[in-house]
Image: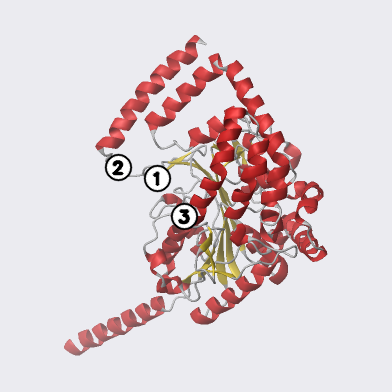
Amino acid sequence: MKKIISLFLCAVLVFSCASTAFAANEERTPVIVVSGMGTFPIVNNETGENVFPPSAKTIIRTVLGAAPSLAASVVSGKWELLGKYGAKPIHDLFEGMKCDENGNPVYDTTEKTFPGAAGQYDEFKEGESVELAVVRSCADEIGWENTYYFYYDWRRSALDIADDLEKTIDCAMQETNSKKVSLVAMSFGGTITSAYLYKYGSQKLKNVVYASSAIYGTDTVGELFSGNIEIRMDAIVDYLEEFLIGSDFAYNAVGLTKDVLAKYGKSAKKAVDAYFLSMLEALREPVYSKVFMDTFVRFPGVWGLMNSRYYEDAKKAMIPYGNLSESFIKKTDEYMYSVQMKTEELIAAAEKNGVNVYIIGSYNYSGIPITKGSKNHSDCLIDTYLMGGLATVADYGKTLNGSVDVSKKVCTNNAHNHASTDGIIDASTGILPERTWFIKNMRHVEYGYNSQASKLVAWVATNENGVDIYSDSRYPQFVDMNRNTGLFSSLTEGIEVLNEAQEKSFPQKLDEWLGRLVAFVRSLFLKTV
């Protein structure tokens, strides 16, 4: 009997060891987070100074150089003075970033790179927010040895950067002995990932996640490069108000101020808008000719940040300022006509090849208040309808009220409801209605570590079997993110997201109480107008 029991225990032990070994060897597809622009500095190799973001010394020099002409313009109302004397100091702020007419850097610069798995670098292990938090969240799912981060000089063409991404993909596959990788394309990284699909196809890819990504560029860059600048007081107030989301008291206090101005400050608004208009007319020429000329206009990568419908107008407006070469235009043409304008085809080809493609966007912020794009919902930088794969999105401050072009619906299944319960978004017109998520009240790439936003990205990026908006009730298609806790609440009809109640600190409770008081006063005011 003892022998039988011993043999049984040995069998159990052998089976357990084999199961453990099998689990340890379970294949996990490595993830490469494709960075956005500006996460790490571009450095001048000769001086060692940061050229972007500019060093503190450079910024101070710019402020001191432009301050006299700015003050004179404000006092006199003659903005020509700032254009004549202040443009050069502002231009010098970006001097170290200059590129020539071919789009090549004038100065010897370099950017930080991260060869090998992300676990080698303390930046990621301690990352609490934005892209670093996403890297860390992916590592929590699949291990540091399977998580990578790709950074680059964002001034270059996305087509050229895609060549470097291909090398990183090959490196990750070789180091992890994997057949495929997954990409998380964040912000500007979306232009690079789409360029990669165009140049190299999708044979090496498992999942592609466009997270807060400029898939279709932005209206702001398109308008700016087309010479269409517009500044309005109400757009500025809206934009500033949004940065207070998360503080009930501050948000409602500014909202009350805005309501009072809307009622009693109409004449003041007209005067301020007229003032801005005169300022723009005086500064348009010097800004484009002296500041944009050999900086942003000559960055091939930045051209990819405009929506394609602005592209030809932008060329007509900017080529005279930038004196761009034929090779420069040829490369931006190739990106715009073969990549951005073919995005849906590129994604469809990837999906046909077995790749899972996902989109994650956010909303409830107006666009940057320097162009007509300020009327769009955005994440403070990228327009929601473009980042969301051409989903239908109401103008900022309004709702759709059922006004959706049925002819543009991609999802034609009437049983599927792709409308947010706040009436702002209908995702049925987007290119991936079943695999697109929208997060309300999350700013651009604001994926905090341990927040549900970063966990959502990691969940879709590391899933081996493919998921969609119905796969997990924690992540319905539309959610509202609490900026204090990072937790989601549902804005999807018929779905409730359950979260553990979190104890609020006294400052948070005080802010909530004061916010309710101001909100009550605001409601009384609105009833009287």
Disc 2 + disc 1, Cβ < 8 Å: yes
Q: Nearer the viewer, mark 3 or mark 1?
A: 3
Residue 35 in picture, x, y percent from top left: 54, 62
- Mark with earlier residue (2, 1): 1
Numbered label tally = 3
Left or right, 184 with reference to 515: right
Amino acid type of the residue that numbered disc 3 sits on in the rendered structure? Ala
Image color mode? secondary structure
Q: Is residue 349 visible?
A: yes
CA distance for labels 3 and 1: 36 Å
Nearer the observer, 83 or 331: 83
Residue at the disc numbered 1: 487
Residue at the disc numbered 2: 502
CA distance for labels 2 and 1: 10 Å
- Mark with earlier residue (3, 1): 3
Q: Is residue 401 visible?
A: no
Residue 51 in picture, x, y percent from top left: 55, 61
At a point 80% along the width and 46% down the height, the residue shown is 313
Left or right, 41 with reference to 85: left
When asked about the image quadrant of residue 109, the answer is bottom right
CA distance for labels 3 and 2: 40 Å
Q: Nearer the viewer, mark 3 or mark 2?
A: 3
Residue farthest top in this picture? 528
At a point 60% along the width and 49% down the height, the residue shown is 90
Amino acid type of the residue that numbered disc 2 sits on in the rendered structure? Gln
Label 3 crowd bin: few (<14), some (14–19), many (20+), radius 10 Å? few
Nearer the observer, 78 or 398: 78
Residue at the disc numbered 3: 56
Amino acid type of the residue that numbered disc 1 sits on in the rendered structure? Leu
Left or right, 100 with reference to 398: right
